[in-house]
Amino acid sequence: MKKKKSIFIIIFSVLIITLSTIVISLYDNVREKQIHNQVYTKEVNVDFQYFTLAMAKEMNPDYQILSFDKSVPSNIQKEFSNIFNRNMYNIKQNFLNDKNFKYVFKQGEKVLSNHKDTQFEDDETKYTFYTVGSYDSNGKLQGEGLLNNPLFQDFDILSMLENVYAIDTDYEEEGLISFIDYEFEINLNKVKVNPVTNLSIQYMLPQNIDRNGYVSNIFISYNNFGYLIFSLCACACIFFIYMLFYPVSVVEEVNPFLLVKKWKAEFSFFLLIVSISLGISGYLILAENTMNGIFSGILIDSGIQYAKELLLICNFIILSIVLILISILFFLLKYILVHGIIRYIKEDTLFGSFIKWIKRSFDELFHLDFTQPFYTEVIKVVGINLLVIFFLIAIAPFDIFLACIYSIVLFLYLKRNFDHIQENYKIFLQYTKQLGDGNFDKEINEDLGLFNSLKDEFNKIKVGYKKAVKEETKSQNMKTELISNVSHDLKTPLTCIKNYVYLLKDDNLDKEKREEYIKNLEQYTNRLTTLIEDLFEVSKVNSGNIQLNQTLLNVVDLLNQTLAESEEILSAKNLQVVKAIESEDIQVVLDGDKTFRVFENLLTNIGKYAMPNSRVYIDMHQDEENVYIEFKNISETQMNFNADEITERFVRGDKSRHEVGSGLGLAIAKSFTEVQNGKFKIIIDGDLFKVIICFNKA
C-alpha cells in the first residue's frame, strides 16, 4: 500500500506541475493571438468616434459637432449638448491618459500628436494595433483596419448615447427619446453630427505593452477569459479521468484526501465549493490582469523588481491550488459512489448523524433496563403513552382517526421490538451452547439490546473460563513434568547410592578402593540433598510461605563475595570475569542469603554452560530509583530454547541431561528476585546469553 500511495503522489504532483506550467507558458501566445484577431465591436467604435470628434474639435475650434433643427428649443439644445460633450470629454481623457496609445492628427499643415515622430508611420509590424484613415472635404472616410469598419463610417447619435446612458425610446413617434436620469426628451431625427472634413488620422499601440491603459485594455483583455476558462476545463477533465481510474482505496489514504474524507459532507462540500469558486475567480482575475499587463504595470510603478516573474509564480501557485481542490471534489464524488450513497449519508453527513441521534434517543426512551426497579420502567412507558393520549384528545375532531393510526404504529413498534428481543435471545443462547461445548474462540460482538449487560458478563465469564482451563492444563502438564523430572533426578543418585552401599559390603575391598567409593557416595548424597533443598525452596516461593530477612546491604560487596566463592567453578573452564561497576558502594534493602543464592545460581549456570576460555561480563549501574545488574556470557552449545522456557522448573541448558544439577537454578534465581519486588529478565541473542536483574532501591 505504501508503494501505491507513493506512486499516486508522484503522478498527481507531476500532473499538477505540468498542467499549470503549460497553461501559464501559453499566456504570451494567447495574448498576441487575441490582439491580432481582434473583432471591433460597436462599443469600441463608439469610443473611437467620440475621441475622433473631440480631437477634430481641438484641431479646428470652429468645427461645430452637433447641429439641431430650428424646431428644437434652445434650452433642450443646450442640455443635450452638455450631455453629449460631457461624455465625449470623459472618453477623450481616458484616451489621453493611456501611455500606450499613440495618435497623429493632420489637417492641412497643422499636426496634433503625442507620438515622438509627428509624421505618419507606415510600418505596421512595429505595432500591436494600427489603423489609418482620412476624411475628404465631403466628410467621406477612407481608411484601413478599424477606420475601414462600416460601423465607423457614420456617426450614429443613438448608438453613441446608448453606450453610456439609459434611454427610453418612444416608438409611437419615431426618433423620440428621453433620458431616464434627465427630465427632457428630444427627437433624434432633428439632431445630427456634422461631418469631419479634411482630417487625416492614425491610431497605434506598440508591440510590448507593460502598462495598463484605457485603450490598451480594450484590445488586450478581449476574449482572454475564453482561453482561461477553456484551459481550466481541460485540466479539470484530465484530473477527472485520473481520479476515475485510480483506486479509491489508495487515494483515501493520502492527504489532503484523507483529511477531507473525515469531515462531514455538509462541511466538506460547502468548504470545497466556496474555495473552488473563490479560487477560480481569483485565478481568472489574476491571470487576466497578468496577461494584459495591468498588474505588472502596478508592481513596476511601485518599484518591485522581477514583477513579471513574481506574477507568473503567483499564477502557478493559485492554479495548482485550484486544481488540487477540484481533484478533491472529484475524489469525494467517486468515494460516495464507491461506498454507496445511502451509507455515505448515514455515516458521513450531519443529517445522517442527526437521524441516528433521534433514533438512538427514541430507542433509549423506550428501552427497558432490567437493572432498574420494574415500577420505574412501567411508569415511564405508561407516562409516555398517557402524554400521547392527551395530545390526541387535545387536537379533536381528529382524535379518533389519529388514535387508530397511533394504535397501528404502537402495534408495529412493539412487534418489531419483540421480534428483535426474540432474535437477540436466540443469538445469546447459541453462544452459550458453544461455550458449553468448549468453543472459547467465539465472541459476542452483536448489539443484543436488552441482553447487552448479560453479553458483557458472558464475555468476561468466557475469558475467565478460558484462562482457568489454560491454567489447569498448564498445571497438569507441570505436575506430569514434575513427576517425570523428580523421579529421574531422585532415581539417579539413589541408584548410585544403593550400588555403592552394596559394593562397600564386600569384605575383600581394599582400603584405597573403599575410600574412593565412600567419596563418590558422599557426592551423590550431597547431590540428592541439594535437589531436595531446591525443591523445598521452590515450593516455599510458589506457596508464598517464605521468610525474608531484609536489611540494608552493599550489593557490590555481596557480588564480590559470591565471585570469590565461585572462583573454582569459573576457573575450571578458564573463564575471565570482566566487571564494570559504577560505584563500589551501592546500598539496597535486600535479603542477603536469598540475593547471594541468586548470584551463586547465575555464576554456577555460567560455569556449566559458558564457552571455555571466554570472557564473562558483569555490569552494575544505578539511577535514582533502581539498581541494574547484568550477567553476559557466550554459550558453549547452541541455545535451542527461548528465554521464557529456560526459567521453568527442571529445564536445563543441556537438554541431553548430562550436566549435574536439578534444573532449578534459574527458576530459583528468578523466584528469589521477584519475591523481593525485583525484576528478572533473560535475553538470548544468537550465542549471547544475558541476564538482567533490577532491584528497587526503595
Image (cartoon, grey):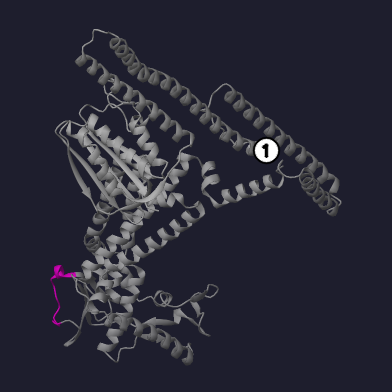
- Pick the front one: 26 or 531: 531
Residue 21: quarter of image = bottom left
Task: Find residue 245 and report its horizontal and vertical position in percent.
Answer: 35, 39
Can you see residue 215?
A: yes
Callout 1 secondary element? helix
Side of 643 where 305 appears, left or right? left
**Residue at the spot 20% in from the left edge and 34% down from the top edge:** 568
Residue 296: quarter of image = bottom left
**In the image, which residues are magenta?**
116-127
**Residue at the spot 38% in from the left edge and 55% down from the top edge:** 325
Task: Find residue 647 and report its horizontal and vertical position in percent.
Answer: 35, 32
- Pick the front one: 372 or 563: 563
Q: Is residue 226 above or below residue 202?
A: above
* Amino acid found under the numbered disc labelled 1: Leu
Side of 42 where 442 appears, left or right? right
Magenta span includes 241? no
Side of 96 where 384 appears, left or right? right
**Dot 1, how many residues are within 10 Å of its Cα: few (below 14), some (14-19), or many (20+)?**
some
Q: Which residue is mark 1?
A: 450
Task: Find residue 271 and report its horizontal and vertical position in percent.
Answer: 45, 58
**Residue at the spot 28% in from the left edge and 65% down from the top edge:** 314
* The N terminus: image quadrant: top left
Can you see residue 130?
A: no
Q: Is residue 661 above or below residue 411?
A: above
